[in-house]
Image: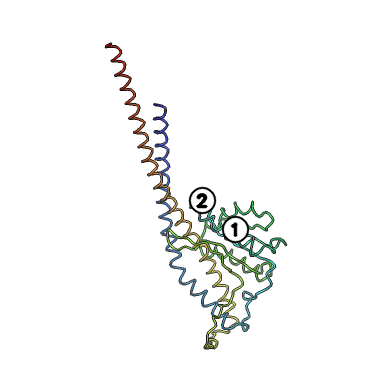
Amino acid sequence: MSGKLKEVRERIKSVQSTQQITKAMKMVSASKLRRAQMAITEMRPYANRLDKMMKNIVTNLEGDINSPFVNVREPKKIAIVVITSNRGLCGAFNTNIIKEAILKVEHSYSSQRASNNLSLIFIGKKGYDVLKKKYPDCKLVKDYIDLYSDLSFDNISKSSQMLMDNFISGEFDIVDVCYGQFKNAGVQEPKAVCFLPVTAIEKKETKTAKGKADYIFEPDKEGLLAELIPSILQTTFQKFVLDNHASEHGARMTAMDNATTNAEELMKELKINYNKARQEAITKELSEIVGGAAALSS
């Protein structure tokens, strides 16, 4: 019985130690989440508005726009950017993003993969660790795997510029991005979106035909769009990375909070078991004493 009590005591100590770790990690993630959430909530309206403006211009100008980023080519060479975290302990956050990437590889671009024209570009180690084993036949690019060490616009724009340069040169015909979109601390939605080429907004059929918007460009249209579109694309890509960064900390904070709660419940259960075992041991000892005393008196 003493061996059983010792085992339960050791389990209680182990769970208490784990709970202290998960509680500390929750507090660290909450602190990091505040900064990351502030960064994405301040940037998202600006980035979304720029993206909408760019697509409105492309839609209204239709064929009357001379930009390499709007050229829709036959999808022979594909690049998928997989943005995950560097560390785990954040629930199913990374798994859900990886599932989106797998869906693209195995269903949307299976023919390109078969012809060895599919590239996987990784930001964050978790996606790379899983997909390098699953798709060794794809071109794996890990030059930007440690991008989280510096989330400044200048550093992130190096990766987005590489994607744009390769799109212009014809190395990539389509660039998709898989990432986690931050909703709130408890909700992160995995997304797979097309980054390049820039697509026009689908026009809904209406009874009343609307004319094109008449844009006035100053300076000339070609010069303005040559500067405007790349700048907006870089801002959009930074939004993807910051979204994912905030989602990671939100997911980790929620996961550690759940782990702390589970540890508390497990400790309560173990303490009940410990008290029961202790009570049984005391009852047994008392019975032995009473039995021994009775034997002596007789």
Q: Quadrant of residue 211?
A: bottom right
The quarter of the picture where the N terminus appears is top left
**Depth check: 231 or 70 in front?**
70
Q: Is residue 182 above or below residue 71?
A: above
Front residue of 231 and 38: 38
Query: Neighbour class for label 1 at 10 Å: few (<14), some, many (≥20)?
Result: many
Q: Earlier in the sequence, mark 1 or mark 2?
A: 2
Q: Residues within 10 Å of mark 2 (few under 14, many from 20)?
A: some
Determine the residue located farthest toward the left in the rendered image.
297
Residue 290, image quadrant? top left
Q: Are marks 1 and 2 in contact (CB under 8 Å)?
A: no
Q: Say the numbered circle drawn on residue 198.
A: none
Q: Which amino acid does the dot numbered 2 rest on?
A: Gly
| Residue 297, placed above or below residue 35 | above
Looking at the image, which residue is at 61% across and 72% down?
A: 197
Badge 1 element: strand
SS state under label 2: loop
What's the residue type where badge 1 is placed?
Phe
Q: Position of residue 88 (x, y in %)?
A: 51, 50
**Quarter of the rendering containing residue 121:** bottom right
Q: Is residue 154 left or right of residue 10?
A: right
Q: Taking 141 as reference, is 289 above or below it?
A: above
Residue holding disc 1: 122
Residue 257 coordinates in the image, percent (x, y): 41, 51
Image location (x, y in percent) of residue 177: 58, 64
The color scheme shown is rainbow
- Tell me the distance, in whole angstroms, between the alpha carbons under discs 1 and 2: 16 Å
Residue plotted at (45% across, 60% down): 187
Q: Tell me the residue that label 2 is attached to.
A: 88
